[in-house]
Image (cartoon, helix red, strand yellow):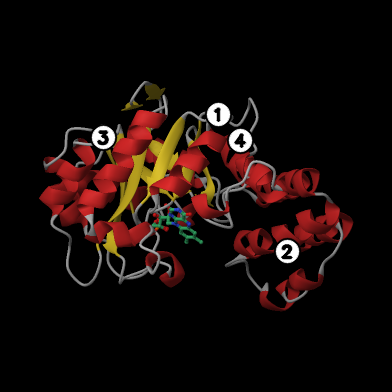
Amino acid sequence: MLKIGNLKLKSRLILAPMAGVSDFPYRMINRKFGFELAFTEMINCRSLSYKSKKTKRMLYSDAKDKPIGVQLLASQPEYLLHALDVIKQYNFDVLDFNAACPVKKVVNRGEGAALLKTPKKLNRLLKLIVKEVDIPVTVKLRTGWDGVACDIKELASACSDSGISAVFIHGRTRAQGYSGEVDYQTIRKFKKHIKIPVIASGNIFSAQLAKKMFDETGCDGVLIARGVLGNPWLFKEISEFLKNGKILKEPSAKERIKAISDHLSMSVDFYGERNGVKLFRKFLIWYTTGLPKIRLLRESINHMKTKDEMMSFIPRCFNF
Ligand SMILES: Cc1cc2nc3c(=O)[nH]c(=O)nc-3n(C[C@H](O)[C@H](O)[C@H](O)COP(=O)(O)O)c2cc1C
């Protein structure tokens, strides 16, 4: 079991927030395969407004999409306070604050991973959120800004002193982006300096890599990100392996076709046919990665406009 403030989770595996990916249909297909806590896409507090259709869609959730966390990006208290006012009208179970995003435009504004360089400021922002909301607050960090790890002790105390309930930490520096080795040792050091749960992220692409993260860092949970793109079965694979060391059989072609078709239907129901199909193209690419003789077939994906077109294409990828 994993406890984040008053939120009790049966699973120690959490579906990571991913900008441009973690929308409602994506969360729902992953929940079908076992995920418990999931996150919305990162929300930039500067662009959050009460009425915008885009905001409403990004914050949309329903009774089946639970427990659900929202993730905010900010560096200025006034934008943050405004966003918290909007967020309070929704029914989120966790609020995560992003101090990990590596994107240049973001860090140049002092947001995301830039906050790793200013732990005092990070601490003030976290305190402000904890004071304002009555749900558990968490933070998402990286292990460092440039080539070297941060002052882990200082970062850990900036987090614990703020009253937050858990920390997510991606085992890479901002300079590494999303590639290069995961720094298990720094996560382990961080865990030693903090009493609240530490949920680790980085290269959770298989059951074995998930176990390695637990073993090498002593973390309380893992955050699953790219590993689940096109592979919602990863949750079960990891859970089984952690429970009894068993490696599950790969899903059959029929199971795959069903999951992809269900995900496409959810995308079309949520966004309407035109946008639902368009937004699903990238998922279809992920779902079909590695299939034999798929290259030529896949070239047509980016031209597909209707649900029927995609629905009839999916079984063909598996030679049905
Ligand atoms: C396309 C993409 C979008 C991401 N968006 C976010 C985000 O909005 N918020 C966040 O905290 N992390 C984000 N991440 C980072 C992931 O949550 C995760 O920490 C990172 O990918 C490392 O895990 P992995 O190596 O298992 O993918 C994103 C990663 C990717 C690949």
- Counting residues from the start of the chain, the first of labels 1 and 3 encountered is 1
Spatial separation of the CA atoms under disc 1 and disc 2: 33 Å
Mark in the foreground, 1 or 4:
1
Give left or right: position of 17 versus 55. left
Spatial separation of the CA atoms under disc 1 and disc 4: 12 Å
Determine which residue is flagged by label 2: 317
- Residue at figure coordinates x 61%, y 35% from the top left: 32
Label 1 with label 2: CB-CB less than 8 Å: no
In the rendered structure, find residue 197 and report the number of the disc placed on it.
3
Q: Is residue 104 visible from the viewing direction of this image?
A: yes
Residue closest to the eye, 6 or 266? 6
Q: Where is residue 87 in the image (x, y as percent from the top left)?
A: 54, 35
Give left or right: position of 216 versus 72. left
- Residue at figure coordinates x 17%, y 60% from the top left: 150
In the rendered structure, find residue 32 and report the number of the disc placed on it.
4
- Counting residues from the start of the chain, the first of labels 1 and 4 encountered is 4
| Element at label 1 | loop
Residue closest to the eye, 283 or 113? 113
Q: In this view, does 27 lie above or below 212?
A: above
Q: Given the current orientation, which residue lies at the most extreme front position?
A: 78
Spatial separation of the CA atoms under disc 1 and disc 3: 20 Å
Q: Which amino acid does label 4 sit on?
A: Lys
Q: Is residue 88 above or below residue 310?
A: above
